[in-house]
Image (cartoon, grey):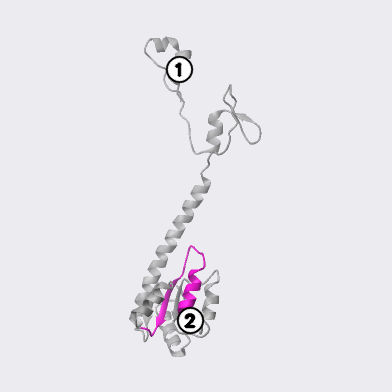
């Protein structure tokens, strides 16, 4: 997985990158919040970002708020890295839109575990987005009848957009997913087959 690191402290940045690369991730490292913000606006932005709370130009929570303001079906997973341990600070970071936080100095095992949680969530998010896209495509492909349909008052044929008059079943089948099974209603049966109706029988449905 591609991971963005935004950390102005060189030592922390190097250690973070080393732990993540050892776990098999592709790492992009930045040194301040403004650069991280620029990268996270790109169409091919990393799906997960670890942002230091205190950085030059833009602090971590502000980057998080800006990223969350971007309309997208695939929001990135954002982890704040911070020395702040007060509950009020942690709540403020989460309310800004962070998915998780990691206290400094961080434990490599905890870092890998929290990143793994993010990876699993992103996989679920991606699968859900794919299903939603498939559903939208299916809905777009469903044909529906809308508006005023010109129909002959006598023969009941329907005029299509090209001006041709077609039988009702032909027109409906062309504009919907419906199919037809032919039969004869009681009134028509009485008119067309009086001998059967009078005898208490009715004609069999057609094919």
Q: Is residue 64 magenta?
A: yes
**Which quarter of the figure has residue 102?**
bottom left
Label located before the other in sequence (1 or 2): 2
Q: Which mark is residue 187?
A: 1
Mark 1–mark 2 distance (CA, rounded to whole Å): 79 Å
Question: Which residue is drawn at the image coordinates 39% and 67% (left, top)?
Answer: 121
Q: Along the line of sight, which residue is nearer the eye, 95 or 192?
A: 95
Q: Residue at the right extreme?
A: 163
Mark 2: few/some/many CA within 10 Å (<14, 14-19, 20+): some
Q: What percent of the width, then of the height, locates residue 151?
A: 59, 28
Question: Which residue is drawn at the image coordinates 42% and 63% (left, top)?
Answer: 125
Question: Which residue is drawn at the image coordinates 44% and 21% (left, top)?
Answer: 185
Q: Which mark is residue 59?
A: 2
Question: Which residue is drawn at the image coordinates 58% and 35% (left, top)?
Answer: 148
Q: Which mark is residue 68?
A: none
**In the rendered view, would you say 96 is above or below 12?**
above
Q: Along the line of sight, which residue is nearer the eye, 144 or 138?
A: 144
**In the rendered view, would you say 68 is above or below 89?**
above
Q: Along the line of sight, which residue is nearer the eye, 74 or 101?
A: 101
Contact, mark 1 vs mark 2 (Cβ under 8 Å): no
Q: What percent of the width, then of the height, locates residue 152?
A: 60, 25
Q: Residue at the bottom extreme?
A: 11
**In the rendered view, would you say 129 is above or below 46?**
above
Quadrant housing the N terminus: bottom left
- Bounds of the magenta span? 59-84
Q: Is residue 163 magenta?
A: no
Q: What percent of the width, then of the height, locates residue 161?
A: 63, 36
Q: Residue at the front extreme?
A: 88
Secondary element at tag 2: loop
Q: What percent of the width, then of the height, locates residue 157?
A: 58, 27
């Amino acid at each position: 997985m591609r991971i963005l690191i935004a950390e102005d402290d060189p030592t922390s940045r190097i250690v973070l990158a080393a732990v993540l690369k050892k776990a098999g991730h592709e790492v992009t490292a930045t040194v301040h919040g403004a650069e991280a913000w620029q990268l996270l606006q790109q169409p091919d932005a990393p799906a997960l970002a670890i942002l230091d709370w205190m950085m030059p130009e833009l602090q971590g929570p502000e980057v998080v708020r800006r990223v969350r303001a971007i309309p997208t079906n695939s929001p990135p997973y954002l982890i704040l890295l911070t020395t702040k341990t007060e509950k009020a600070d942690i709540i403020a970071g989460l309310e800004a839109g962070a998915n998780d936080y990691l206290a400094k100095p961080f434990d490599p095992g905890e870092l890998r575990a929290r990143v793994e949680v993010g990876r699993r969530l992103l996989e679920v998010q991606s699968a859900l987005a794919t299903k939603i896209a498939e559903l939208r495509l299916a809905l777009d492909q469903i044909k529906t009848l809308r508006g005023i349909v010109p129909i002959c008052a006598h023969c009941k044929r329907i005029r299509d957009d090209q001006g041709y008059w077609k039988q009702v079943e032909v027109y409906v089948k062309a504009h919907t997913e419906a199919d037809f099974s032919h039969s004869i209603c009681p009134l028509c049966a009485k008119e067309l087959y009086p001998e059967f109706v009078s005898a208490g029988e009715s004609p069999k449905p057609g094919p």
